[in-house]
Amino acid sequence: MSGKLTAVIWSEKAPDEARRERFIDFIESRYGERAGLEWRFDGSIKNGFRLEVGSDVYDWTVEGRLAQLKKEIYAAGESEGGFDVVPLMKESIGAWEPRVTADRIGRVVSVGDGIAVVSGLEEAFYGEIVIFEDGSRGMVQDLRENSLGCILFGGEEGVYAGSEVRRTGRVAGIPCGEGFLGRVVDALGSPVDGGGAIAAEEYRPVEQAAPAIIDRRPVNLPLETGILAIDSMLPIGRGQRELIIGDRQTGKTSIAVDTIINQKDKGVVCVYVAIGQKASSVASVVRALTLEDAMKYTVVVSATAADSAPLQYLAPYAGCTIAEYFAASGRDVLIVYDDLSKHAVAYRALSLLLGRAPGREAYPGDVFYLHSRLLERAACLTEEKGGGSITALPIVETQAGDVSAYIPTNIISITDGQIYLEGDMFHAGQRPAVNVGLSVSRVGGDAQTKAMKKAVGTLRLDLAQYRETEVFMQFSSDLDEATRRKLKYGEGLMYMLRQPRQSPMSMHSQVIFLVAALNGCFPDSEPEEFRPRLERLVGVCEREHPALCSRIDGGTLTADDEAEIISAAAKME
């Protein structure tokens, strides 16, 4: 409290002098100074009174005491992890005694564009949930000297200047549980797929500190995407953060969806977070996952372009919280953020509406921290912390291939590598359009099985030589035979890396492809015939050499295994 302390008592009848003195003594014992007490008439209060001291409210009406009991019951239910209503009510009512507690109540100063400015909640903290008079919720996002800036999670129709705002003392959080698997929820954890309510097992705050270094273990287990170009040259490990970056409509979401589909029967829980996407795009992703029977181990968190900026801002943190729930039980989790450039735009809109100073490209100064505190939560945890992992695949959209823009460079510096999709390659028919020269995985071979590490050999070097030769070919029409063979071989490798959508490859298929291609099998094949012949070779190996395929899937590849693949390819000639 600051300045002259004032107090107002609301009741149907004015208190007598003795009662006024008791009120004044109570205020002095609580706040350390005497206050002038003013009485105001309120005909709606038939029993009891309501005492307002600054922004503190002591509600001693019948309604206020019932509300206090209701809070006790809900608090007990949450602490027990659920509601067994009848025993819980009996126990709570039997033990309940009304307590003299103050509700801190503020007032809305102004509201508009999903932002409410509130006064009178001096002790509210950043990230705290507040409840408005109409029951809608908001979150404290900006702390000022005499007011707060709150973002609204619902509509603003019932929020108006002068209406009451109450603190909850709780940070923003969402319910979590096994029931979320196979469901589509919004940024607040409420189902939006028409499938009914979800039974929550736990309530977790959306903002959590990232695991400490001592709580992490090395990233050395592969998370297979089923995409040959990635698993062979840009391996992703469980607990890694690998950025997928490229222009609009270059197949970024397709890579993420294919990776989710490839986790079938591998014990990996998947979380797909759609931020600022069209509702039809989210529906098509859900439909693709449903058709491939991948929704049973996937949670979709949706904050579409039609949702407010506060919900788009909150969505990736909500998705990460759900992922942490599963990782805490020792499971491996894959989370896709699609996409973080739209997330940054939503945060920029909020920040400008809150009156924060704009920086580069009008983004606020803490936009780097916006994503670093999110992506740092991806980790491979020690056994003491449950032994689970969270692998993050953030997606960022570039403009005209500009990877040096503000948001892309920020996220590149946070992640452990990037998969760069090139527009020209995509339009030329190379899909996935992975530019191996600009893409990198900073975990590298540590996230590959021994079989894949041995099979990939000189693939990356061969592709680099092909691209270099292809550039010089443009300036010469007369090529020697060795150069022609090198170009044909390189073009065949590029065709080999072409892969249809939603067709993930098994580990043994990828290894057989690489061993046959890099050992010069099918030298007379035209480039466009190369991949079909490799697919037939895989079929032969699966039928005639099943033990070989099992050994490769188990992670081993011996010299005899390589010879067996080459021999099978020679018999097909």
Image (cartoon, rainbow, N blue to C red):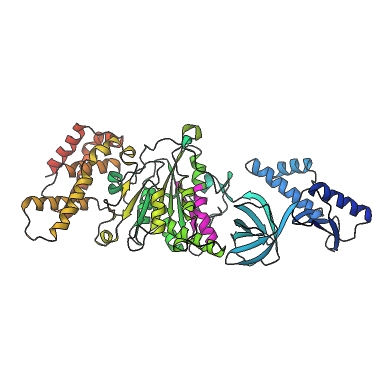
**Residue 530: x and y, percent?**
17, 50
Image side of residue 16 versus residue 327, left or right = right
Magenta residues, start to end: 296-320
Q: Identify the residue at image location x=6%, y=59%.
A: 478
**Residue 40: x and y, percent?**
85, 63
For the C terminus, the image quarter is top left
Note whether 327 is above or below 153 in the view shown.
above
Asked if one can make out residue 181 in the rendered structure from this viewpoint, the answer is: no
Q: Nearer the viewer, residue 320 or 226?
A: 320
Note whether 305 is above or below 56 in the view shown.
below
Image side of residue 121 versus residue 191, left or right = right
Q: Nearer the viewer, residue 561 or 378?
A: 378
**Residue 481: x and y, percent?**
6, 52
Q: Nearer the viewer, residue 250 or 358?
A: 358
The answer to if 313 sits in the magenta stretch is yes
Name the quadrant containing residue 151: bottom right
Q: Identify the residue at image location x=33%, y=37%.
A: 446
Note whether 148 is above or below 319 in the view shown.
below
